[in-house]
Amino acid sequence: MQALLVRFNPLLERTFRNVLSNQASLSVITRADGLRSGVGFKNTPVKGGLTSDILRYFESFAGSTAGLPEIIFYALSPQELDFAHDEVLLLRKKCAFRDVPILIVADGAVRREAERLLLAGGSGLVRFPEEMATLPIRIRESLQPVGKRMPVIAKLINPFISATIDLLATMADMTATRKDLFLKKNYRLAGDVSGIMNITGRMEGSVAVTLERGLALEIVSRILHSPASELTEEDIKDGVGELVNIISGNAKASLAGTEYAHEITLPAVIIGYGHEISHPRGAPCIVALFESGAHTFGVQVSVQVKK
């Protein structure tokens, strides 16, 4: 398992290394002047923000997912509150819609501030030192897919993938390439704008297309043949709603007559980072990640198939 530790002082880092020995390969971002990995550490305090270090860490992968962290731990202390929100938000965005847990490590003195970081992209809290004995269990729980376990069913998800690629090519003259496919670990959407449609019939659930605001503006601008600077919030909502409507409609047509035949409702659009949508109890969540130019976006299908 690849793990990233951010803002860990030497004592905390040593504690985590002892607890996670033989379980994880650790990289560490501790100071504003560089990255560290391996077993050694220096007793140097954090000074200033770590934005450049976080960016350099993710840029070192050059677009590859190999070696990316499977879990991130962010240590919060009273001296670093000014930087914490922006750094956790940046970590979440640099994960590029990949469902990487970000656990906030904090003691009781900053518990309230740590809870606020969940709104910036944190996945949960680890109380130090009380919860160190159960840390391996917390890690296993954080890495488990949400809902009932199931394989990623190609026959179910492929129509949504094809519809997404075809729509962007024909309506926006944009190329989208599927880069990854996985079962999600929670129901939170990491984009700024999401179009959502509910599914009923032989299967029950929802499909969501979630985008960064910049990509949403570009797609809607191309579809409407209007400069992005002239688009209103209503234009964005209408455009993203139409996007998920067409993708869902085309996938529905492809699945008609199969065990995954279904109906769709009218689309809804949510604007605002880190929103979460409801799903049938225990429903698994399949995510297809796409790249279009410099942007990443996701199509999320969360359904239960009725017996």
Image (tube, helix red, strand yellow):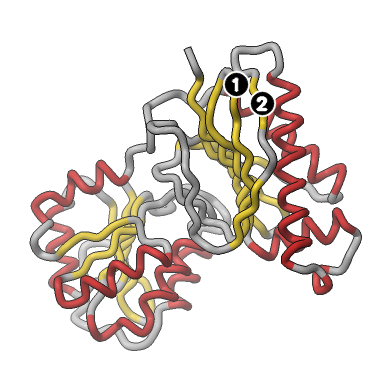
Disc 1 to disc 2, C-alpha distance = 6 Å
Q: Nearer the viewer, residue 164 or 45?
A: 164
Question: Which numbered tag is attached to residue 252?
Answer: none
Q: Is residue 110 above or below residue 262?
A: below
Callout 1 secondary element = strand
- Circle 2 crowding by C-alpha within 10 Å: few under 14, some 14–19, many from 20: some
- Regarding residue 253, the answer to whether it shows in the image is yes
Extreme residue toward the front, this view: 266
Residue at point 39% right, 43% down?
185
Residue at point 18% right, 44% down?
137
- Regarding residue 33, the answer to whether it shows in the image is no
Give the side of residue 286 with respect to residue 40, left or right: right
Q: Nearer the viewer, residue 81 or 234?
A: 234
**What x and y, as percent, mark residue 233?**
72, 66
- Whether the residues at callouts 1 and 2 have beta carbons within 8 Å, the answer is yes
Q: Amino acid at mark 2?
A: Glu
**What x and y, as percent, mark residue 77?**
23, 78
**What x and y, as percent, mark residue 142?**
30, 46
Q: Is residue 82 above or below residue 295?
A: below
Question: Which numbered tag is attached to residue 201?
Answer: 1
- Residue corresponding to mark 2: 263
Callout 2 secondary element = strand
Q: Earlier in the sequence, mark 1 or mark 2?
A: 1
